[in-house]
């Protein structure tokens, strides 16, 4: 039921309805604030990042996919913003402090839930690929074969392999509807 409510709110938000944005903000801002604070330990940084997350949601409202988890989406944005903050501060000789703090508050359970959901959506997208395209993509991403190895294994040209991998990435990106989510999935090796 909660997903259906979020889906309806996201559909309205995509149309620019401020009330839908307010509802999502009220529903998720507290949890998001706690999540960010567990990393930063600073109320000021946490408030700034929370506001920036929802600013990005508003900016990207037309591209939101109502079928994907809004919670996972804002957590990914928040995590990226926190990491950017850590990188910025690391340049100011605070690297040791920030990395030790980040490792202490690292929440494996929440990460597992988020990335499991992302992995599920990416796997659904991969399953929708045309058969040959899917086969080549899986050999590349799951089996870790190079373009040359795939070409030799399937007796096709390397350019065909590259074209099929690019086609797969475009179709997956289109299906997921979020370039940021795709990038994260590729980084963690879910695809």
Image (cartoon, grey):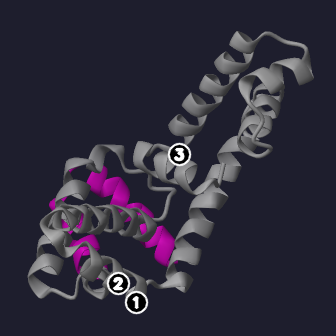
Number of residues whose C-alpha sits closer than 10 Å to that of mark 3, classed few (under 14), some (14–19) or many (20 or more): many
Asked if the residues shown at circle 1 and circle 2 are in contact, with their CB atoms under 8 angstroms apart, the answer is yes
- Write down the region rendered in magenta: 1-28
Distance in Å between CA atoms under marks 2 and 3: 34 Å
Number of residues whose C-alpha sits closer than 10 Å to that of mark 2, classed few (under 14), some (14–19) or many (20 or more): few
Distance in Å between CA atoms under marks 1 and 3: 32 Å
The answer to whether residue 2 is above or below residue 188 is: below
The answer to whether residue 133 is above or below residue 53 is: above
Q: Which mark is residue 180?
A: none
Query: Horizontal and vertical percent for residue 68?
Result: 50, 58
Main SS, magenta residues: helix
Q: Residue at x 69, y 50 (%)?
A: 124
The residue where tag 3 is placed is 176
Which of the two residues, 74 or 142, is positioned nearer the viewer here?
142
The residue where tag 1 is placed is 104
**Among numbered discs 1 and 3, the one appearing first in the sequence:** 1
Distance in Å between CA atoms under marks 1 and 2: 6 Å
Q: Residue at x 76, y 46 (%)?
A: 142
Q: Which mark is residue 100?
A: 2
């Amino acid at each position: 039921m909660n997903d259906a409510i979020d889906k309806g709110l996201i559909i309205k938000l995509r149309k620019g309805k401020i009330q839908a944005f307010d509802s999502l903000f009220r529903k998720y801002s507290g949890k998001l604030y706690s999540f960010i604070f567990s990393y930063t330990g600073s109320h000021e940084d946490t408030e700034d990042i929370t506001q920036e997350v929802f600013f990005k949601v508003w900016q990207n409202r037309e591209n939101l996919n109502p079928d994907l988890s809004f919670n996972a989406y804002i957590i990914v944005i928040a995590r990226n913003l926190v990491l950017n903050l850590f990188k910025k501060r690391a340049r100011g000789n605070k690297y040791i402090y920030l990395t030790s703090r980040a490792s202490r508050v690292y929440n494996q359970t929440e990460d597992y839930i988020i990335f499991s959901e992302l992995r599920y959506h990416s796997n659904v997208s991969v399953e929708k690929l045309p058969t040959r395209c899917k086969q080549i993509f899986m050999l590349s991403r799951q089996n870790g074969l190079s373009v040359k190895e795939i070409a030799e294994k399937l007796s096709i040209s390397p350019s065909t392999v590259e074209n099929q991998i690019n086609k797969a990435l475009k179709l997956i990106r289109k299906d997921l509807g979020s370039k940021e989510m795709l990038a994260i999935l590729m980084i963690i090796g879910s695809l």
